[in-house]
Image (spheres, grey):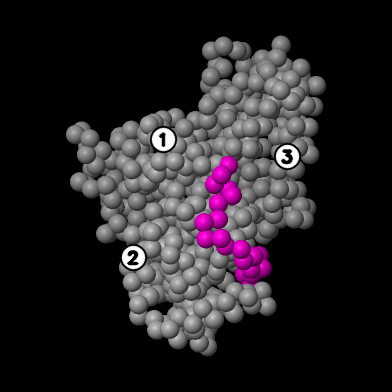
């Protein structure tokens, strides 16, 4: 009697851990691999067309690879997962189903319900796609105890011996290089072009199919991502060679003409298993030891992967489902429709939103300090922000978007994840980018005609939420500056912010 291994679409690992676990127990011919494209899942939100092309093409290429390796593969395009598993069961009559735990809470619940709901004997192996799933560096955390990213990150560095010397100290003598990093991009430094992948026949077929969905964000046209592990490894090599040597130094920089700057743009591959976190950070560490990248750039990248990415996953597993209902500021404004069109006079948001709608990608500082910053300052309801972020990005999955939006981006969780709300006025945006040069708003004006919305919204936010903000010592300096606004200025800021928010869609 055969057994079924159900491989989820975002678990395209090579080799797949479920197959590895069965290798010595079961003959390859006795295994049927099940992969499912669920149209119901695709309908859940207006996902980016390029995300679905990436996902489906990568799944189909992965299935072809398994067939070539001698496995029987049952690849199903179905209305929903339940229908696909039921019909698979009726056709193949396997004796049990083995699968790796889903990254999402909802997915795990579904897997756990299979035995009871469908009478299917199910064996769920632990998720090994995340390092914090393999080893928890903070095993004694009590429920409700705050664990900061820095503490988590240092635990991960020690556990995986990344950039650590023989005495257990960080290589280079310090844990972070913020002093050297986060510089604006010099005018005469041009970031390299991104590597592009020409779609093959299979990807072109997927592009046609996805192009027929009528509910999606953006377009499948112009798809140029890798869809196999080999392609994703090539993209990673391109990053190590051309962008890692500048990554940390300019990781917070923004430039209108350079969407990726020196970022890796590898999360879309990492999040579906084409790459693994450990191989990326080990390769980056190797670049430091080879002398091809300096420590501040390598440490900055390793921090993003085993610090922030893993921390987000770890927090998601701890804080869901409650995290998805948080609204610390009581924000209730609707997301402006220009998030779906890019049609706004604010040049920074226009450029970035149009880029998201086109490619499903902007780098992390544009997500945090432009998109999330605006939504927080404008008191947009967190659920609407979450839906937009989850829809619009090619690398969006629930485990990463829930902590990033409700925690990091909007501080809607009241500080369980981030140590402070990330808010900024035009001053910061102008310092770190060139967007303000081509904007019809005046970056220097707080109120009045042509004043930048980031300015009056910023001061309005400080005034409106000062009681809550005073509880956070990291906000003291920002709040101190409120003293320099007289009553008339405060009234003007509040009136203009309210007018602006009321007219965002007019
Ligand atoms: Fe953005 Fe304001 Fe600068 Fe315009 S002036 S680009 S709205 S920060």
User: Tag 3 or tag 1, which sits nearer the N-term?
Assistant: 3
Q: CA distance from mark 2 to mark 3?
A: 49 Å
User: Is the residue 75 above or below the residue 359 in the image?
Assistant: above
In this rendering, position of residue 83 left or right of residue 123: right
User: Tag 3 or tag 2, which sits nearer the N-term?
Assistant: 3
Report helix, strand or loop for mark 1. loop
Q: Nearer the viewer, mark 1 or mark 3?
A: 1
Query: Is residue 330 magenta-colored?
Result: yes
User: Is the residue 126 above or below the residue 422 in the image?
Assistant: above
The part of the chain drawn in magenta is 321-344
Report helix, strand or loop for mark 3. strand
Marks 1 & 2, CB-CB < 8 Å contact: no
Q: Position of residue 476 (x, y in %)?
A: 33, 65
Q: Position of residue 273 (x, y in %)?
A: 54, 37
Q: CA distance from mark 1 to mark 2?
A: 29 Å
Q: Assess mark 2: CB under 8 A from ligand 1?
A: no
Residue 284 visible: no
Residue in the image at 35% along x and 51% along y? 300
* Magenta span main SS: loop
**Residue at the disc numbered 3:** 38
Q: Position of residue 279 (x, y in %)?
A: 42, 37
Residue 46 visible: yes
**Residue at the disc numbered 2:** 476
**Residue at the disc numbered 1:** 142
């Amino acid at each position: 009697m055969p057994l079924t291994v159900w491989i989820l679409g975002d678990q395209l690992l090579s080799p797949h851990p479920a197959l590895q676990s069965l290798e010595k127990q079961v003959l390859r011919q006795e295994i049927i691999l099940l992969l499912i494209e669920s149209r119901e899942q695709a309908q859940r939100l207006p996902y980016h067309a390029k995300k679905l092309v990436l996902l489906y093409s990568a799944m189909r290429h992965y299935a072809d690879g398994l067939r070539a390796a001698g496995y029987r593969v049952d690849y199903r395009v179905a209305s929903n997962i339940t229908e696909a598993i039921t019909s698979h069961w009726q056709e193949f009559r396997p004796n049990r189903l083995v699968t790796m735990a889903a990254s999402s809470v909802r997915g795990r619940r579904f897997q756990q319900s299979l035995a009871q709901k469908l009478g299917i004997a199910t064996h769920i192996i632990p998720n090994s796609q995340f390092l914090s799933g393999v080893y928890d560096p903070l095993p004694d955390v009590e429920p409700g105890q705050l664990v900061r990213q820095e503490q988590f990150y240092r635990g991960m560095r020690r556990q995986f011996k990344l950039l650590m010397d023989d005495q257990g100290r960080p290589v280079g003598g310090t844990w972070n290089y913020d002093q050297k990093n986060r510089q604006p991009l010099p005018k005469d430094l041009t970031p390299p072009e991104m590597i592009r992948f020409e779609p093959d026949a299979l990807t072109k077929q997927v592009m046609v199919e996805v192009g027929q969905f009528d509910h999606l964000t953006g377009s499948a046209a112009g798809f140029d991502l890798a869809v196999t592990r080999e392609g994703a490894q090539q993209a990673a090599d391109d990053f190590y060679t051309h962008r890692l040597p500048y990554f940390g130094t300019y990781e917070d920089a923004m430039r209108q003409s350079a969407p990726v700057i020196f970022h890796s743009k590898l999360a879309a591959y990492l999040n579906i298993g084409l790459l693994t976190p450990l191989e990326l950070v080990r390769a980056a560490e190797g670049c430091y030891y080879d002398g091809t990248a300096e420590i501040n750039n390598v440490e900055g990248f390793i921090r993003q992967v085993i610090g922030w990415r893993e921390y987000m996953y770890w927090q998601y597993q701890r804080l869901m489902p409650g995290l998805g209902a948080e609204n610390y500021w009581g924000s209730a404004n609707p997301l402006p429709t220009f998030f779906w069109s890019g049609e706004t006079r604010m040049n920074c948001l226009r450029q970035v939103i149009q880029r998201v709608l086109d490619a499903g990608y902007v780098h992390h500082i544009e997500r945090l300090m432009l998109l999330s910053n605006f939504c927080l300052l404008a008191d947009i309801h967190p659920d609407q922000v979450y839906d937009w972020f989850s829809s619009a990005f090619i690398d969006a999955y629930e485990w990463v978007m829930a902590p990033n939006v409700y925690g990091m981006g909007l501080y809607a969780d009241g500080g369980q994840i981030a140590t402070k709300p990330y808010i900024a006025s035009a001053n910061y945006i102008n310092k770190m980018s060139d967007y303000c040069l081509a904007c019809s708003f005046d970056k220097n004006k707080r109120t009045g005609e042509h004043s930048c919305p980031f300015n009056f919204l910023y001061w309005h936010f400080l005034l409106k939420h000062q009681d809550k903000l005073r509880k956070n010592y990291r906000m003291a300096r920002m709040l101190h500056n409120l003293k320099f606004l007289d009553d008339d200025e405060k009234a003007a800021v509040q009136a203009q912010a309210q007018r602006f928010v009321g007219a965002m869609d007019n």
